[in-house]
Image (tube, rainbow, N blue to C red):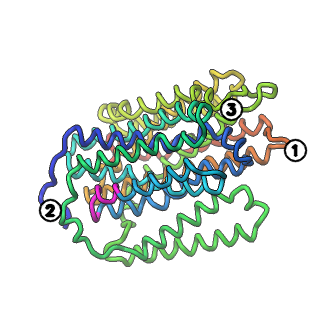
Amino acid sequence: MIETLAPAARIGKPAVAALGMLAVATGALESVVAPTLPLLQRELDMTPAQGALLSVVLLVTGALITPVAGTFGDRYGGKRVLIRLMAVVSAGGLVSALAPNLPVLLLGQILQGAMVGALPLSFILVREHLPADAAKVAIGVVSGLFVGGGMAGTLAAGPVAEGLSRHWMFALPTIAVIMSTALVNRLMPHDAPGRTDATGLDWLGLALLSGSLATLMLGLALAPDLASRPLALGALVVVLAAFATGWIAVERRATEPMIDLRMLARPAIWQPLVLTFAICVGTSVAVYLVPQLLAVPAGEYGFGASATEIGFLLLPGAVAATLAGPLSGMWVRRSGSRAVVTAGIVILAVGLIGLAALHTEVWHLVGGKAMIALANGLCVTALVTGIATAVDRRDTGIATSLVLVTRVLGYAVGAQLSGVILTAATPSGSDIPAESAFVTGFVIAGSVAALSLPVVRSMKKGVTR
């Protein structure tokens, strides 16, 4: 068994710093689309629905790749899988940078989506090569630096796109990904040879899970059109049910299942998943709607902000999210994860409902978005750290992958819901949705967040176990 292998070599601060640099680079590459979405919509002549698709296509790949990456990392070693995954991400970044049109840009984003699998692989490495207490700190640091990278991408994307071109806003973080990957490859110890002896990989379960996630994400991507096409909707539901039913049946019989269904039944696992989904739906609505509202012409009800201005206006929220990581870790040690998540959800719901009621001044949007980002950082860091330390070391990759896949699904649902609401509220012949659409989106997101509070109350006090 994996747990009986000889202790892995310990790593020092330079190796953890290399993982942190990679987290910054991938976070930056992931975040460049959000603040520049209005600019991309203009340059590539996209509808709001196509803009929503562009904003989630990276997450679609992430949902498919992350459980695969986590499983392979648990079995074959985090380093070798991470390096190969970053090669795919780098290729995707270069395709996005060179993309002349929307289809090619979508292809680049699909390849970039592999970056979502980098976090569980990083968690595998720190749990493998650090003592338990140090590993918890390192997980928080890497998570926080990923958010920090998102802050850098959010801030720089607009100025780079407007000062140079939209191509460079993808190229620069891609170069950073390539350089930091080389550094990780040099500083991290080689994976233990014994890990390659793992046998019996659940290929059928892997294929059925991938089919389930692909069908679900396809349904979300096509959501704006499915309401008028009931036959297509029915076909997707049938295919999804078939994949999901087959996956459950295979996992129950598998000697070494990809995901142990008994693990999913543990409150320490399913509660964080439910909460992560609700929290990310609410956060994603704000991530999508706030830049759109800022970009609405000042002659209407918006502020006519450029991509550069939107990036700077979103900066306080990115700072709040970055600070939330270490703050959450300290708060969890003092008061327990349930207290942190409860406070985060309350802040999230208040921020969203506040935006629905007050959005007539720029500071309303800046302040509300900062509250939402802080709440998201508090909650997700507490939930990821809790679930990472609630399972055996050999299950770190798949357990944290489940949280990240759930995060992806939450973000995809929120973005597509926002796109549907704006599209439905845009009058024929106009590209400006009714103001009521933004109010509706914020209210729905706030309600979803608030309705998750009963799940938090069922959690055990203290750190999730």
How far is disc 1 from disc 2 in space, using C-alphas? 66 Å
Give, as a three-letter code, the residue at label 1.
Gly
Q: Residue sitting at 64 percent across and 69 percent down? A: 237
The quarter of the picture where the N terminus appears is: bottom left
Give, as a three-letter code, the residue at label 2.
Leu
Q: Nearer the viewer, residue 345 or 113?
A: 113
Q: Nearer the viewer, residue 312 or 330?
A: 312
How far is disc 1 from disc 3 in space, using C-alphas? 26 Å
Q: Please rate how many residues cluster around mark 3, counting C-alpha atoms within 10 Å: few if below 14, some from 14 to 19, many from 20.
A: many
Using the image, determine if residue 90 lies above or below residue 150: below
Q: Marks 1 and 2: CB-CB under 8 Å?
A: no
Residue under label 3, please give it: 356
Tell me: 409 left or right of 116. Answer: right
Magenta extent = 75-83
Which of marks 2 and 1 precedes in the sequence? 2
Which of marks 3 and 2 precedes in the sequence? 2
Measuring from the top left, give residue 220's x and y in whole percent: 63, 58
Q: How many marks?
A: 3
Q: Is residue 82 magenta?
A: yes
**Mark number, residue 46:** none
Tell me: 76 left or right of 253. Answer: left
Using the image, determine if residue 388 lies above or below residue 371: below
Residue under label 2, please give it: 5
